[in-house]
Structures are given as structure tokens and as C-alpha cells.
């Protein structure tokens, strides 16, 4: 952990502090309306349910804003786990970049206060956290289109396929100080679930055997270590870094990506894999949420369609961007101007996308395993009250994830992943 720097003037916000901090901001006052006595009085409520920060909703007579403040420690654990306030700086920078690249897919930033590590942003209403909607069995028909627009735009435009080398290097430099947050990922996703770590937990005793087997599985530990190296050393694009369904706010018609505090220049497959993993975890959790067996069959089918759609649509959109706007310093167009060159470049793009799917599937597996054996779990599974049912769902997810990670190259198409997920459930039901 880097040494903690807390600027003079920083203090964790209270409701009173939020009021004070916002009262001097003309743009924010214009959105809320004046903080006046009676009906005009701003209503401030703390709503944060994430692992890291404080989040306030402020409602005024005219509208609302969200105030997110970083704490100098990890909220989930407390002051014993110090964490750099600078994550708010990286989050604000990523939100602004994402807004430029994928307008309408992220909340607008109205104000960033570096001293308070505070971002004031658009209040998304009536959006809910996607994970909660999925647990309730809600379908989001526009989700695949929206999330693939977001990923294709943000990943392509911040890659060397699109950027000039000097600009790309500046981007890498702009985000390279986000080391505390990268370290969380490096430890909690790529290391701790495969060793005895103090904060690991799982449904015990039901999963004790598989947790131990994973700790003793050299094939798996080599595979996760290769992924860790890729995460640490690849600077392919500006990635969100924590793109799970708790980082998405949705309605039937809209999808917004929030919380990019883990953003840095990393491997694109990490974001794609995060989306796939969280859909698959939800898929496996549905047995614990249906009231009668089969009640969620249609929902399960929708989730698997979404898994396939996320990759296939992303691939199509990313390829198209590359064809139309591939003016970066990688694969210079000047080298491929004749018919044979153009044909070879098309083949190369196919090869690139195949490799990207392999990366995404490896990271997908890593993200599934960490949510079942590591410190931070998903409510999709956590909210299954009966431990035996929960463990059965988790075991299926773990077995698929292990195979995905160790035998990634036997999954050449996303449909082989959805088939395997279906089979993992059907086999267990037999
Ligand atoms: C201890 S922090 C745990 C997790 O919360 C965030 O959402 C990230 O996924 C991080 O790994
Ligand atoms: Mg988050």
C-alpha cells in the first residue's frame, strides 16, 4: 500500500458537510434549486452500499445530484485497511473520458473536488443497480446493445488501434498512479482465492473441499498467474476495471456505467470478462431465487442470451470501429493498402478478436472464482438463504470457471461457454 496522503481540508462528509460543500457551487445549486427553508430544503441521505465509499443523494426542489466521496480506508473493512483518496481523482477522470467516448452511457460529472475527494454527479432516476434487478428476475432488453456500445467505444478509442502513440502513452501515464486500486485487484482476484488468506470466505463446510482443491491445483494456479501477469503488464486500453452488474444502473430503456475508480490502462479482456462473469454468476444463482423449480427458466435463457450477445455484439462493434477508424499507430494503414494487404489485415483482425475472447474468458473465470472463494461476494449468491442451495449453485459456477480458466482454448466461441453453463446446471439436476 502506498503511503497515505490526506490533504489539509479533507474530512469525511456528513449530511451537514454535504450541504456546505454544495452550497458554493452555482452549477449544482441550479440543478437542485436553492437550499431554502420549507419545501426547498435539500434532503441529504447516505445511500452507499458498495465496498469502498460514501455516497449521498441530495434532493432539492428542482432536481437531485449524487455526491460520492472516497474515504481514506476501505469501507468494507474499516480503518485497518487504508486506501488512497486519489481513487476519486481517477474515477472523475475516467467518468469524463467515458462521457466523451460513450455519451449517455455514464452519469455526467458536475463537479470534482480534489481536496474532499468528492465527485458531484448526475442523479440517475428511476434507475436501480442492475444486479438487484437481475436477482428479482427483471429482463433488460436494451442492456446488450448499451453495454457493448460502451465497451466497444471506450476500449477501442483508448487503444493503440485508434490512438497516436504519444497520446496513448500520456493516457497510460495519467492513470498509472492508481496503484492502490490495482493492488486490490491483484491480491483479491488473482492471488488470495488460491491461498489461505485471512479475509477469504466461502459457504462452509459445503465448499471446503473445492476451496482446498483449488488451493492445491497447480494447473489452476499457473493459469491465474498468467492472467495476473497480463493484468499487471498489458496497457491495451483504458479499462473500467470493475465492470460488474453492481457498477451498472438500469431501467428498461437505459443502462449507465458507474464507479470507474479502478480505471487504468490494462487488458481489454478484463472488462469484457467482468461483464460475462457477473451474468454467469447470476445465471447460476437463479436456482436459489425461484420459488418453484423451473419458475426462472425463461429468465435463465435470457441471461445466457445476454452472455452470448455481449461478446458477439461487442466483437461486431469493435471490428467495425477498427475498420472505419483504425488510424492509430498500431497496424498502420499504409502497410496494408493493396488488395492482398487488406485481406491479410482482415484476417489479422479476426485473429486479434479470437485472442481477445480467450483473454476475456480467462478473466471471466477469475472473476467468478473470486466472488465465491474470496473476500467480496455477490449478493446474487449471498442472498440465497439456504446454505446447501447456495453451495450447490456456487459449486456449479466454480467448476465451470475452473474449466474455463484451465482449458480456455477449448472455448473458441461464446456459445461453447453458454452451452457449458447450461450443461453444468442440467447435469446437476439429473
Ligand atoms: C475489498 S474491495 C472488494 C471489491 O469491491 C470492488 O467492487 C472491487 O470489485 C473490489 O475487488
Ligand atoms: Mg464499485
Image (spheres, rainbow, N blue to C red):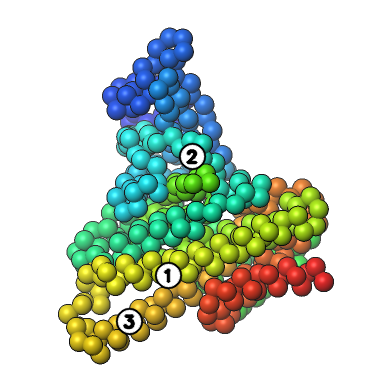
Mark 2 or mark 1: whose residue is earlier in sequence: 2
Q: Which residue is drawn at 46% across and 9% down?
A: 38
Mark 3 or mark 1: whose residue is earlier in sequence: 1
Q: Residue at x 67, y 65 (%)?
A: 397
Location of residue 122 with respect to 343 vertically, above or below: above
Which residue corresponds to mark 1?
Answer: 315
Q: Residue at x 68, y 53 (%)?
A: 381
Q: Nearer the viewer, residue 154 or 397?
A: 154
* Element at label 1: helix
Q: Where residue 356 sits: x, y (%)?
A: 43, 73
- State the CA–CA distance, disc 3 to disc 1: 13 Å
Location of residue 289 with respect to 22 vertically, above or below: below
Which residue corresponds to mark 2?
Answer: 53
Label of residue 346 in the image? 3
Confirm or deny contact between disc 3 and disc 2 (CB under 8 A): no
- State the CA–CA distance, disc 3 to disc 2: 45 Å
Location of residue 29 with respect to 241 vertically, above or below: above
- State the CA–CA distance, disc 2 to disc 1: 34 Å
Indicate yes or no: mark 2 CB to ligand 2 under 8 Å. yes
Amino acid at each position: 500500500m502506498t503511503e497515505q496522503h490526506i490533504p489539509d481540508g479533507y474530512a469525511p462528509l456528513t449530511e451537514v458537510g454535504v450541504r456546505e460543500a454544495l452550497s458554493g457551487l452555482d452549477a449544482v445549486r441550479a440543478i437542485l434549486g436553492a437550499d431554502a427553508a420549507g419545501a426547498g430544503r435539500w434532503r441529504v441521505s447516505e445511500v452507499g452500499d458498495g465496498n469502498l465509499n460514501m455516497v449521498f443523494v441530495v434532493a432539492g426542489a428542482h432536481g437531485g445530484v449524487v455526491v460520492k466521496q472516497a474515504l481514506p480506508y476501505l469501507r468494507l473493512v474499516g480503518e485497518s485497511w487504508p486506501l488512497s483518496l486519489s481513487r476519486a481523482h481517477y474515477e472523475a477522470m475516467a467518468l469524463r473520458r467515458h462521457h466523451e467516448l460513450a455519451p449517455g452511457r455514464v452519469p455526467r460529472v458536475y463537479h470534482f473536488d480534489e481536496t474532499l475527494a468528492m465527485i458531484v454527479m448526475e442523479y440517475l432516476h428511476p434507475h436501480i443497480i442492475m444486479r438487484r434487478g437481475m436477482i428479482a428476475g427483471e429482463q433488460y432488453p436494451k442492456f446488450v446493445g448499451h453495454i457493448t456500445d460502451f465497451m466497444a467505444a471506450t476500449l477501442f478509442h483508448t487503444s493503440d488501434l485508434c490512438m497516436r502513440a504519444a497520446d496513448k502513452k500520456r493516457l497510460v501515464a495519467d492513470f498509472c498512479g492508481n496503484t492502490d486500486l490495482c493492488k486490490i485487484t491483484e491480491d483479491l482476484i488473482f492471488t488470495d482465492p488460491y491461498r489461505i488468506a485471512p479475509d477469504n470466505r466461502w459457504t462452509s463446510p459445503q465448499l471446503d473441499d473445492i476451496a482446498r482443491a483449488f488451493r492445491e491445483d497447480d494447473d489452476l494456479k499457473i493459469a491465474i498467474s498468467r492472467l495476473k501477469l497480463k493484468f499487471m503488464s498489458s496497457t491495451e486500453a483504458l479499462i473500467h476495471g470493475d465492470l460488474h452488474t453492481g457498477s451498472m444502473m438500469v431501467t428498461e430503456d437505459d443502462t449507465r456505467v458507474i464507479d470507474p475508480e479502478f480505471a487504468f490502462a490494462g487488458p481489454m479482456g478484463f472488462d469484457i470478462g467482468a461483464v460475462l462473469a457477473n451474468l454467469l454468476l447470476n445465471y447460476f444463482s437463479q436456482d436459489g431465487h425461484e420459488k418453484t423449480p423451473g419458475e426462472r427458466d425463461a429468465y435463465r435463457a435470457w441471461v445466457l442470451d445476454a452472455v452470448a450477445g455481449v461478446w458477439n455484439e461487442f466483437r461486431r462493434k469493435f471490428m467495425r470501429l477498427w475498420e472505419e477508424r483504425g488510424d492509430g499507430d498500431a497496424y498502420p494503414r499504409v502497410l496494408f493498402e493493396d488488395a492482398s494487404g487488406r485481406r491479410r489485415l482482415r484476417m489479422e483482425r479476426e485473429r486479434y478478436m479470437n485472442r481477445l475472447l480467450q483473454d476475456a474468458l480467462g478473466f471471466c473465470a477469475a472473476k467468478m472464482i473470486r466472488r465465491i472463494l474470496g473476500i467480496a461476494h455477490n449478493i446474487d449468491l449471498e442472498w440465497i438463504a439456504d446454505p446447501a442451495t447456495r453451495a450447490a449453485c456456487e459449486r456449479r459456477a466454480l467448476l465451470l470457471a475452473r474449466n474455463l480458466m484451465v482449458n480456455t482454448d477449448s472455448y473458441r466461441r461464446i456459445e461453447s461457454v453458454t452451452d457449458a453453463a447450461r450443461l453444468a446446471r442440467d447435469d446437476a439436476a439429473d
